[in-house]
Amino acid sequence: MVEKIDLIGKYEERLFPKMRQIIVDTGEQGLLRHHVKGLIELDVTKGLEYIRNYKKKTGETLSFTAWIMKCIGQAVSEHNEVHALRKGKKIIIFDDVDISVMVERVVDEENFPVVFVVRKVNEKSLREIHNEIRTAQAQTEDDYLQKKEAQRAKMLLSLPKFFRNLFFWRKIKKDPFFVKKYAGTVNVTSVGMFGKIGGWAIPISNYGLSFALGGIAKKPGVISDKIEIREYLSMTIMFDHDVVDGAPAARFVARLTELIENAFGLAKMIGNFK
């Protein structure tokens, strides 16, 4: 007699959260963009030293993501063609740098990531950016803005997929001013899932200019012809090749690297706590 083997084993069945359909739609649309991806390592030793010293003196933890956004905002303002959006036969280049970050919200008792846009990052101080992010993270399910966001999301999902593609996603592709108003022009995703071993994340994004902050790892680096242990951030940068060529993208990356590795914005805000 042959013994029957259970090839399935134990399992749990859950309903697919309806709100996650937005993530599915976003992924499908993001795959249609012609992104050029760059994986770089940035020496953030100096910046992290400022942040840690600030915490020792004040007890407050400054947002690392807010600091990186400050540097990105400055670099984009100096090379603003990198966040341009296409409108038919024209390219729209905005002066303001509006950067979106993902903030977790509770919608229908489920944790759900939504877009939060920090406006005019290029004109704001690190403190202002930090405060806006912390305020957004602290919002509860009863907050007016969160309720409004949930209502918009539910209204969008009430439409059949055909109509979502025909009206909502088509408008996003064709109307850069609509995109700027509701989603900003730059996206920053802070993954950090690789911890101290470093590592890059390659997201799917609907933004023309998108960043993914990966892990931070300690590695040997050459400083003034001497080998030192430094801390390096793994960063992925995605450019829309429809509107940005390699040369301006390279100049932007060079400037962003300079700003981050010299702790732009932190020295002015914090000073030297040594």
Image (spheres, grey):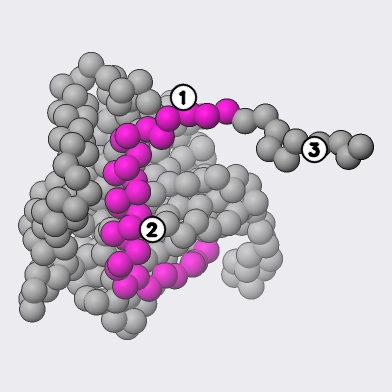
Q: Which residue: 10% across, 49% down?
A: 181
- Residue 5: assigned label: 3
Q: Which of disc 1 and disc 3 is earlier in sequence? A: 3
Q: Quadrant of residue 147?
A: top left
Q: Quick check: 232 left or right of 264?
A: right
The secondary element bearing badge 1 is classed as loop
Percent position (x, y) of residue 5? 80, 38
**Picture residue at 31% right of the left edge, 35% below the top:** 19
How busy is the neighbourhood of tag 1: few (under 14 within 10 Å), some, or many (20 plus)? few
Rounded to the nearest angstrom, the CA distance separating label 3 from label 2 is: 40 Å
Describe residue 28's horizontal placement relative to residue 55 as left or right: left
* Residue type at numbered disc 1: Gly
> Label 2's element?
loop
CA distance for labels 2 and 1: 36 Å
**From what the image shows, is residue 34 above or below residue 229?**
below
Question: Which disc is residue 204 wearing?
Answer: 2
Density class for disc 3 (Cα within 10 Å; few <14, some 14-19, many ≥20) is few
The answer to which of 193 and 21 lies nearer the viewer is 21
In this view, 144 is above or below 35? above
Which class describes the residues within 10 Å of circle 2: few (<14), some (14-19), or many (20+)? some
Judge by depth and name the residue closer to the eye, 225 or 209: 209
SS at circle 3: loop
Q: Which amino acid lies under the numbered mark 3 shown in the image of this protein? A: Ile
Marks 2/1 in contact by CB < 8 Å: the verdict is: no
Q: Position of residue 241 (x, y in %)?
A: 29, 76
